[in-house]
Image (cartoon, coloured by chain):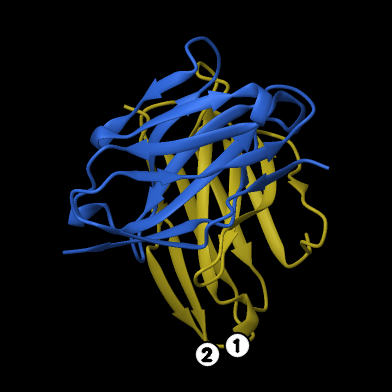
Amino acid sequence: GAVVSQHPSRVICKSGTSVKIECRSLDFQATTMFWYRQFPKQSLMLMATSNEGSKATYEQGVEKDKFLINHASLTLSTLTVTSAHPEDSSFYICSARSDRVYNEQFFGPGTRLTVL
Amino acid sequence: AQSVTQPDIHITVSEGASLELRCNYSYGATPYLFWYVQSPGQGLQLLLKYFSGDTLVQGIKGFEAEFKRSQSSFNLRKPSVHWSDAAEYFCAVGAPNSGYALNFGKGTSLLVTP
């Protein structure tokens, strides 16, 4: 149980285009989902927290107009990187918190974004 | 400010030797503590977690960790390392006042030599 999927696993896009990454909780309802970003050989940094049906809360320094987060259902959150640039190339990882196991997160496998 | 520190960026151990990875945290109250492992290009795998109770926690793959409140530490240990343990290890901390979002340490890269 407690499986989280991400799609796509890898994406390459041209500079200026937008990319959407999906995060799904497959066997539980996720009232809260988190988006993290990991640069090569670095740690994970929290980008934003999203609660189902409400606006995401962004961490300081994260541009909310550039990283659009939608948590429209209890099993799906999406991160859209708008007008992507090479500096947005990174590993994006989502996690989901169950409404039953409130103090633990379950992580997706990550999405590798490369912007050319 | 809340913080998580992993003092060792790289650690090299011989296969079969014991391992200890250090993690120190600075939080207002006892947080929830986690250790994750990440292989290159892969996602995170939870090794173990501490919420409350027994301060010695057993995890998967033969790992254990001990919570020491007086030292604000949650060090990860393994008595005998296998070559397959080579990976990046992250200590993470969460707390109710942050909605349980995790604050990660910078990670420790483990190299296992024959």
Q: Is residue B102 at least partly visible in the picture?
A: no
- Asked if marks 1 and 2 touch (Cβ < 8 Å), the reply is yes
Chain holding disc 2: A
Q: Residues within 10 Å of mark 1 (few under 14, many from 20)?
A: some
Chain B rendering hue: blue
Label 1 element class: loop
Residue found at x 51% / y 16%: A100
Give SS at disc 2. Answer: loop
- Tint of chain A: yellow
* Residue sitting at x 52%, y 44%: B22
Q: Amino acid at mark 1?
A: Ser
Q: Is residue B1 left or right of residue B84?
A: right
Neighbourhood count class around disc 2 (C-alpha, 10 Å): few under 14, some 14–19, many 20 upward: few
Drawn side of residue A21 relative to residue A51, left or right: left
Residue B12: x, y in percent? 35, 62
Q: Which mark is residue A15?
A: 1
